[in-house]
């Protein structure tokens, strides 16, 4: 008999609707004594079975749900089937390349029914992020299944900032199995080659979610002088030159290691002469540029996550307003603004409201040409809208 997690009255509807996160505030009490990471049954206040999940008494997400079938236990066969479905999407449906220099997201947590697990493939290496205690307790099983299905050269663990605090999870970056990935590890995207630092770079080394947005933005940049803020390893900048025909790109980031990687990537792709890389704080750099007569035909904004908790959303919205307001002032008439937010706590309508406020405050008309999401190897679950975190708007500013 599984331990039971009993919900408070009128709290069951989201979970009958298959939302995978049960927060502690929705729970009335627990019957039994489940250990951290143990399998439990979620039931309504009337003792109706809802789902099977994994329990963490230390997390605000007290139960992560995985199966809504009463008799379906969370055993090795269950995890194997879920991994098979995730891999099938990338290989058979999306038909993503599987070469020594291709890269994609193979497992995207809740969107693939595997809450707390992210797996990115870079050539022959797998980069794993485990963001829940329950998945960490099952890491040997998961790693064994990944080795069996994918035959990687090595599996490297990347940790996410703040997970220790929210999940009570003690883990550190490092090799989980096989050989260490090379530094840099080379991948190819839309005909461009990148050196990627999967050991210390942002996320698991590269912003795979922006793959199609970089290519889409480039087609609006022909002949334009482009300002690329938060340029990281040069993805948007190189696409602007190579695929878009931009006349020049000024690419700015605060991280010298990121800029060193970006310069090397530009050299590798033969575009170093058309991109000027600068190290600076983005807000200060844009304010300084406003003091000069030069203006840009396009500005690209791809800042890091600005809010990791709902309480930080008001400050994040003010930050997005300030960034986009500065960008608009730096744009020539009929300039192109490519503006992104990877902050999941900010809804799409809230980000669009920021752009509306910028238009009002600047007196400039902003036309949204494309409203884009993450690449399709980062799918959105209809049960968990939080998986649709990335917002990318390509705009014309008159």
Image (spheres, helix red, strand yellow):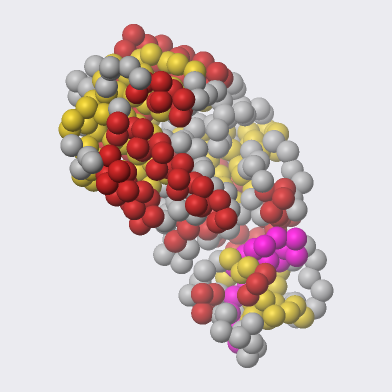
In the image, residue 177 sits, relative to residue 30, either above or below, namely: above
Is residue 312 left or right of 8 when viewed as pictured? left
* Residue drawn 57% across the image and 70% down it: 67
Q: Which residues are magenta?
A: 48-65
Image location of residue 371, percent across then percent down:
29, 48
Give the camera-side residue of 207 and 394.
394
Residue placed furthest toward the bottom: 46
Q: Is residue 26 visible?
A: yes
Q: Is residue 240 visible?
A: no
Residue placed furthest toward the top: 273
Image location of residue 207, percent across then percent down:
46, 36
* Residue drawn 46% across the image and 36% down it: 303
* Residue drawn 70% across the image and 73% down it: 40
Give the camera-side residue of 100 and 165.
165
* Residue drawn 35% across the image and 37% down it: 325
Image location of residue 185, percent across then percent down:
53, 24
Is residue 212 left or right of 109 when viewed as pictured? left
Is residue 234 left or right of 369 when viewed as pictured? right
In the image, residue 52 sits, relative to residue 168, either above or below, namely: below
Q: What is the quadrant of the C terminus in the image? A: top left
In the image, residue 241 sits, relative to residue 66, either above or below, namely: above
Q: What is the quadrant of the N terminus in the image? A: bottom right
Number of marks in picture: 0
Image location of residue 15, percent across then percent down:
54, 75
Does residue 345 belong to the magenta stretch?
A: no
Tell me the chief SS of the magenta region: strand
Does residue 55 belong to the magenta stretch?
A: yes
């Amino acid at each position: 008999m599984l331990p039971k997690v009993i919900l408070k009255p009128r709290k069951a509807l989201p979970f009958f609707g298959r939302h995978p996160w049960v927060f502690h505030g929705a729970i009335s009490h627990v019957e039994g004594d489940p250990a951290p990471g143990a399998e439990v049954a979620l039931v309504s206040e009337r003792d109706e079975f809802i789902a099977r999940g994994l329990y963490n008494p230390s997390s605000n997400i007290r139960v992560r749900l995985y199966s809504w079938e009463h008799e379906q236990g969370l055993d090795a066969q269950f995890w194997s089937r879920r991994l098979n479905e995730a891999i099938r999407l990338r290989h058979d449906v999306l038909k993503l390349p599987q070469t020594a220099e291709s890269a994609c997201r193979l497992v995207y947590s809740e969107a693939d029914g595997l809450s707390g697990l992210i797996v990115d493939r870079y050539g022959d290496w797998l980069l794993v992020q485990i963001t829940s205690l329950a998945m960490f307790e099952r890491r040997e099983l998961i790693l064994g299944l990944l080795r069996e299905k994918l035959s990687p050269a090595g599996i490297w663990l990347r940790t996410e900032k703040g997970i220790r605090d929210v999940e009570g999870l003690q883990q550190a970056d490092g090799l989980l199995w096989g050989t260490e990935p090379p530094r840099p590890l080379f991948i190819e995207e839309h005909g461009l080659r990148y050196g990627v630092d999967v050991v210390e770079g942002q996320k698991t080394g590269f912003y795979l979610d922006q793959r199609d947005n970089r290519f889409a933005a480039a087609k609006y940049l022909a002949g334009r002088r482009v300002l690329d803020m938060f340029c990281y390893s040069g993805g948007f900048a190189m696409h602007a030159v190579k695929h878009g025909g931009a006349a020049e790109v000024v690419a700015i980031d605060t991280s010298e290691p990121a800029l060193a990687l970006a310069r090397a990537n530009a050299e590798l792709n033969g575009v170093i002469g058309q991109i000027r890389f600068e190290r600076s704080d983005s807000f200060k750099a844009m304010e300084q540029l406003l003091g000069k007569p030069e203006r840009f035909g396009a500005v690209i904004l791809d800042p890091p996550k600005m809010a990791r908790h709902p309480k930080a959303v008001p400050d994040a919205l003010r930050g997005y307003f300030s960034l986009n307001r500065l960008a608009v002032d730096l744009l020539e008439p009929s300039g192109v603004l490519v503006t992104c937010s990877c902050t999941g706590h900010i809804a799409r309508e809230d980000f669009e409201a920021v752009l509306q406020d910028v238009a009002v405050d600047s007196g400039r008309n902003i036309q949204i040409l494309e409203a884009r999401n993450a690449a399709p190897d980062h799918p959105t679950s209809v049960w968990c809208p939080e998986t649709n975190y990335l917002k990318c708007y390509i705009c014309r500013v008159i």
